[in-house]
Image (cartoon, rainbow, N blue to C red):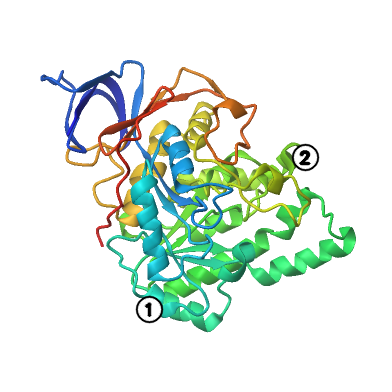
């Protein structure tokens, strides 16, 4: 195995920033020292004027393979992810076919083992009638079970109350939920369809998929989790009102109910529909500036536990459509960390808080083995960032298969210099090393 050392770098870890040398061998961090580490190494990186962060662990992505590979593949999107400082991802089950059997779940792992540049895990999907398959899921090597409590994914909607009750009662591992109340959404949809027909203006999206739809569904999930002591993780909180549901003074490792915020709900607000249109159409919807600020506040006071992307690419042709015909979702993994560092520059977060919510807390939340921290003996999943080098986003440098980004035209204040996965320098200054592939995440459960 190759050896690597990073010298004189500003390490950001567990609420501290300090200058150190970091040596890496056999996939893992061997030594962290404030004094110069002696010895000979296969590769040496001068970390002066750079910050070393644990790689971002993204607990919600849609990489589209199998079945929707005209939008994205595990290879293309994992490549974009590592260029953006994401070293591990957890992918959702609404592919084609849906990941609702153990065989289909294992097929995804086989694809990733051959093609993913980042570490990986895949959620098992729940439906109204696959409880037996769900309960076969191994909590040691699968990140969790995903339940769609909203219409975002068609036939993966779990709306049978008896089934929901049974899953929450019997599932021994983490359940992640998409929470939007279907009845509320349908009622609002018909109201605005009666006014505008099939051409509803996009700025009504957060009114159709409104605060009530989100709060009602999240509340239901939390009630079920409390009733059955379920390990519940509610994804992509989009309203300030929902944040109040997660007030809890317990340390993260003791929480049974946790919450996630996503990049688009931290960056955009309802005024951006005028300029961005369907390119910021997500489910749950981007909502008001007050919601955005309340979510940021929830992150800072630890009511919201982790930050993710909900990376969900569609083609330009698909997004350039009317309200009902434009699918929800957009590509984010290549610039998620840069967006968060811009929010640091704007005073919304500290860089220590960003590291906590994108790495430490994700590892703790999912009980990921030996990742998410810059510690001796842990896997060397690391990202070097330059806080003083701007990066302007245009199509030429996009790595997504869909070849568009909601950040096009924006100039970020920082730049990803290098990304290390399992001790291997997989990305550095625009160049990739694809000789090594990522590993399957393991969980201490």
Left or right of 141 in this view: 335: right
The circle on residue 368 is none
Residue 295 or residue 314, whichever sits in front = 314
228 lies above or below 300: below
79 lies above or below 216: above
Residue 246 or residue 165, whichever sits in front = 165
Q: Distance between the residues labelled 2 and 1?
A: 45 Å
The circle on residue 170 is 1
Q: Which residue does the image show at 40% across and 58% down from the upper left?
A: 108
**Where is the C terminus found, in terms of image quarters?**
bottom left
User: Farthest residue toward the left?
Assistant: 39
Q: How many discs mark residues in the rendered view?
A: 2
Instruction: Classify mark 2: helix, strand or loop.
Output: helix
Contact (Cβ within 8 Å) of mark 2 with mark 1 = no
Instruction: Classify mark 1: helix, strand or loop.
Output: helix
Q: Which residue does the image show at 34% across and 69% down from the upper left?
A: 137
- The spot of residue 270 in percent (x, y) is 71, 44
**Is residue 180 visible to us here?**
no
Which residue has dot 2 on it? Answer: 274
Left or right of 125 in this view: 38: left
Q: Which residue does the image show at 40% across and 64% down from the upper left?
A: 105
- The spot of residue 75 in percent (x, y) is 44, 43
173 lies above or below 203: below
Q: Quadrant of residue 5?
A: top left
- The spot of residue 193 in percent (x, y) is 84, 63
**Where is the N terminus found, in terms of image quarters?**
top left
Residue 285 or residue 417, whichever sits in front = 417
**Is residue 195 visible to us here?**
yes
Circle nearer the N terminus (2, 1): 1
Q: Residues within 10 Å of mark 2 (few under 14, many from 20)?
A: few
User: Farthest residue toward the bottom?
Assistant: 162
- The spot of residue 175 in percent (x, y) is 42, 66
């Amino acid at each position: 195995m190759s050896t690597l050392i990073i010298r004189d770098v500003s390490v950001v870890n567990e609420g501290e920033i300090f200058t150190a040398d970091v040596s890496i061998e056999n996939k893992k961090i061997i030594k962290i020292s404030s004094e110069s580490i002696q010895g000979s190494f296969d590769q040496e990186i001068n970390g002066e004027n750079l910050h070393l962060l644990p790689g971002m662990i993204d607990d919600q992505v849609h990489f589209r393979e199998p079945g929707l590979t005209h939008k994205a593949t595990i290879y293309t999107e994992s490549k974009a992810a590592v260029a953006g400082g994401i070293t591990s991802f957890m992918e959702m089950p609404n592919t084609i076919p849906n990941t609702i059997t153990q065989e289909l779940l294992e097929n995804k792992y086989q694809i990733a083992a051959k093609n993913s540049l980042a570490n990986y895990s895949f959620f098992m999907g729940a439906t109204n009638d696959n409880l037996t398959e769900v309960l076969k899921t191994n909590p040691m090597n699968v990140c969790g079970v995903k339940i769609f409590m909203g219409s975002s994914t068609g036939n993966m909607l779990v709306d049978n109350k008896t089934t929901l009750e049974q899953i929450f009662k019997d599932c021994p591992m983490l359940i992640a939920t998409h929470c939007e109340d279907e009845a509320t959404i349908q009622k609002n949809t018909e109201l605005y369809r009666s006014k505008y027909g099939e051409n509803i203006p996009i700025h009504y999206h957060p009114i159709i998929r409104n605060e009530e739809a989100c709060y009602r569904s999240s509340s239901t999930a939390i009630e079920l989790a409390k009733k059955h002591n379920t390990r519940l993780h509610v994804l992509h909180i989009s309203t300030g009102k929902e944040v109040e549901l997660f007030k809890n003074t317990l340390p993260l490792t003791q929480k049974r109910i946790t919450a996630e915020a996503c990049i688009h709900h931290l960056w955009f607000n309802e005024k951006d529909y005028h300029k961005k249109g369907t390119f910021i159409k997500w489910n749950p919807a981007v909502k008001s500036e007050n919601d955005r600020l309340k979510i940021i506040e929830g992150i800072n006071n630890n009511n919201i536990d982790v930050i993710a992307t909900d990376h969900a690419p569609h083609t330009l042709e698909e997004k350039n459509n009317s309200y009902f015909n434009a699918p929800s979702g957009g590509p984010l993994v290549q610039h998620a960390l840069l967006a968060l560092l811009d929010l640091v520059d704007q005073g919304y977060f500290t860089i220590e808080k960003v590291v906590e919510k994108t790495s430490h807390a994700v590892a703790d939340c999912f009980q990921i083995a030996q990742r998410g921290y810059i510690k001796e003996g842990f896997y060397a999943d690391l990202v070097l960032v330059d806080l003083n080098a701007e990066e302007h986003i245009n199509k030429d440098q996009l790595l997504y298969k869909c070849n568009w980004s909601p950040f096009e035209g924006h100039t970020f204040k920082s730049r990803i210099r290098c990304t290390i996965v399992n001790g291997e320098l997989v990305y550095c200054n625009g160049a990739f090393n694809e000789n090594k592939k990522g590993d399957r995440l393991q969980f201490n459960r």
